[in-house]
Image (spheres, rainbow, N blue to C red):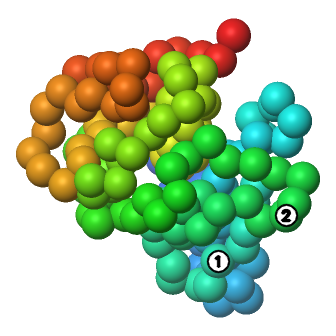
Amino acid sequence: MSPKALLTLFSLFIFLVLVYTGYLFWQEKFELYKPEAVAYFFKGEELVPVKQTLEKGADPIKGSLDRLLAGPPEADYISALPAGLSLLSYERKGEVLSLDLGPGLLGFSGGTAKIKAGLAQLVYTATAQKGINKVELRAGGPAGPLVLGGEGYTIDKPLGRRDVDLE
């Protein structure tokens, strides 16, 4: 490649970097980007996202989980999660989000279908965030197998969307 061609490519690269940097600055300066919470609830038998704009600088992961655990936003949405479930802590480990939902997580009841529906809500809500593909669940203690409900539904690995498919 000739020196002139290399200089042209380098100039184009620098130009694109400057345009992108300017775009990011402009977006923040004029508050065009606001974080968004995305929580999944059931509307009829369909699992659907419910979006909520957060304040500038808010953590979309925490906002999404808080929105989910606060319960359905309207009467025509329902949640399969146990009442009183709370987020004790969360930690992102690469593509896995580790959630400690306290001992209330063990309060799932209503059969395997309801447990799977609640797990789907948790997993879909967490994996709606960029770069998160799986969810590790804890119930107030260290990571390890969890047994939910009277049916003995066992979770022994981080869950992705394919693991909680409702079909």
- Describe residue 115's horizontal placement relative to residue 117 as left or right: left
Q: Is residue 103 left or right of residue 2?
A: left
Q: Which residue is mark 1?
A: 54
* 69 vs 58: above or below: above
Q: Residue at the location (12% across, 50% down)?
A: 141
Which numbered disc, 1 or 2, marks the residue that appears first in the sequence? 1
Q: Position of residue 58 (x, y in %)?
A: 51, 79
Report helix, strand or loop for mark 1. Answer: loop
- Compared with 64, 115 (above or below) is above
Give the quadrant of residue 140. Answer: bottom left
- In the image, farthest residue toward the bottom: 29
Q: Which residue is mark 2?
A: 74
What label sits on residue 96 in the rendered view?
Answer: none
Amino acid at pointer 1: Leu
Relative side of 50 to 71, left or right: right
Q: Residue at x 70, y 85 (%)?
A: 31
Q: Residue at x 29, y 66 (%)?
A: 88
Other residues around mark 1 within 10 Å, as few (<14) / some (14–19) / many (≥20): some
What is the x, y in percent for residue 40?
Answer: 67, 46
